[in-house]
Image (cartoon, rainbow, N blue to C red):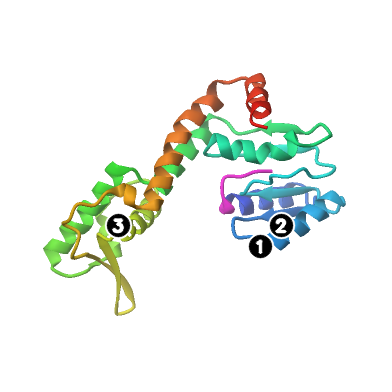
Amino acid sequence: MYVRDDIAVNQLQKIISYSTPSIETGLCYLTTPEDDIDLMKSTLIDGKLNVIISSIPFEEPLSGLKHIVFCHPVPTRDRFISCCAPAVESSEPVSVHLIFNNSDIDSMTKHINAQYPDRRTLANVYKKIKWLYDYKKNPVHVDDVLSELGTIESKEIVFSNSIAIFEEIKIVEQQKNNGKITLAISADADKRHDLKESMLYSEGDKIRKDWVEFSDFLLKKSPADFIKMLIESY
């Protein structure tokens, strides 16, 4: 059972354990060690696990696998294809179930926009930091910037990922003052910087563009179109 992220792994596990406590469940997170994943697969094959809830793709056949369930959409076509690999490469029939709805697709759009801020969002966050920095003539406390961002949805995530990008292109520096994290505009900030110099931004930009195309596919295509896409990918 594929879910959106590590938080959703725990959420689904709680639902299953409450509704059907007899089901043996394995939990696979982004940070789960490879050895633990291999053990989980073996346990599933041996029939000692009924289900694995995962936020990452399983890309090889699993003997005895009957169902792959997408509780949430994944952000790209390539990720979807990777997640379906155990079904496509299996010698036995494996059913693929998409049980998410339009609301889940809207939620994924918001999640991607927060996780991978675009150029306009980054400009807004930087503008707030610089205004406070110029006004105070001192490094800016994180909470002050968050307050200036107002009611932006998922602003803590947007802010955190924006700072990571700014640090990559060396226009903002994080400092520690009296045990608190503050932000300063770097000495080279006035020089011309290209966002594409940031690996984080470039990867996020690709995922945002891929999601626009793939979300349209999810909304409009038939089961036959999904089957065709998977067959043509292997």
Is residue 151 visible in the rendered image? The answer is no
Q: Which residue is at a point 69% across and 49% down the rendered structure image? A: 53
Count of numbered labels shown in the rendering: 3
Query: In the picture shown, does residue 182 fall above or below 17?
Result: below
Mark positioned earlier in the residue sequence (1 or 3): 1
List x then y, in percent, for residue 205: 39, 42
Query: In the picture shown, does residue 234 fall above or below 59?
Result: above
Mark positioned earlier in the residue sequence (2 or 3): 2
Is residue 63 visible in the rendered image? The answer is yes
Mark 3 is surrounded, within 10 Å at the Cα level, by few (under 14), some (14 to 19) or many (20 or more) other residues, namely: some
Front residue (pair 13, 31)? 31
Q: Which residue is at a point 30% across and 48% down the rendered structure image? A: 195
The magenta stretch spans residue 152 = no
Q: Quadrant of the C terminus?
A: top right
Tag 3's secondary structure? Answer: loop
Marks 1 & 2, CB-CB < 8 Å contact: yes
- Quickly name the residue at label 1: 33
User: Alpha carbon of mark 1 to alpha carbon of mark 2: how far?
Assistant: 6 Å
Describe residue 213's horizontal placement relative to residue 163 as left or right: right
List x then y, in percent, for residue 75: 52, 39
- Quickly name the residue at label 3: 169
Q: Which quarter of the figure has residue 71?
A: top right
Q: Amino acid at mark 1?
A: Pro
Q: Which residues are magenta?
A: 1-7
Q: Amino acid at mark 3?
A: Ile
Mark 1 is surrounded, within 10 Å at the Cα level, by few (under 14), some (14 to 19) or many (20 or more) other residues, namely: few
- Quickly name the residue at label 2: 37
Tag 2's secondary structure? Answer: helix
